[in-house]
Image (spheres, rainbow, N blue to C red):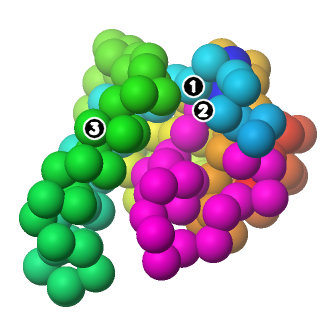
Amino acid sequence: MIVIDCSFAMAMVMPDESRPRSLAQVEEARLVAPPIWVFEVANAFRMAVRRSRLGAEDAAHLSRRIEDYAVLVDGSDATVHQRYIAAQTHDLTAYDAAYLELALLRRCPIATLDGRIAALARRLGLIVHD
């Protein structure tokens, strides 16, 4: 199982982005993400259309393609306080800390192209797919 973040997911499907080096390995794994992932990916497609990186039909097609990866959304019951403490502890936004905390909780690798998340994950002993 691998925790996937929005940056990696978008690089998997966006036509104007470089494919991650570990794409084949990540595609073969069972993928999991925190609930915020759904909103971040949907917003990334919306912003791609808004900035004319994609047409609306292309974004709709790619959003369906993302669903083909069958990412398990882990709806953990973390409280606001727990999310705040995780963000504070890791000096990340609460959104980014959710990915890191999920990887730590599940004791699994993380797939991210976000340099801050990757560096911190490595310092915490996690395997990083980038």
| Residue 42 x, y percent position in the rendering | 22, 50
The local secondary structure at tag 1 comes to strand
Residue designated by label 2: 3
- What segment carries the magenta color? 3-23
- Taking the spot 56% from the left edge, 39% from the top edge, the residue there is 4
Identify the disc placed on residue 64.
3
In this rendering, position of residue 21 left or right of residue 15? right
- Taking the spot 41% from the left edge, 28% from the top edge, the residue there is 68
- Taking the spot 19% from the left edge, 85% from the top edge, the residue there is 51
Amino acid marked by disc 1: Leu
- Taking the spot 66% from the left edge, 63% from the top edge, the residue there is 19
The local secondary structure at tag 3 comes to helix
Residue count near mark 2 (Cα–Cα under 10 Å), binned few <14, some 14–19, many ≥20? many
Residue designated by label 1: 31
Amino acid marked by disc 2: Val
| Residue 84 x, y percent position in the rendering | 38, 44
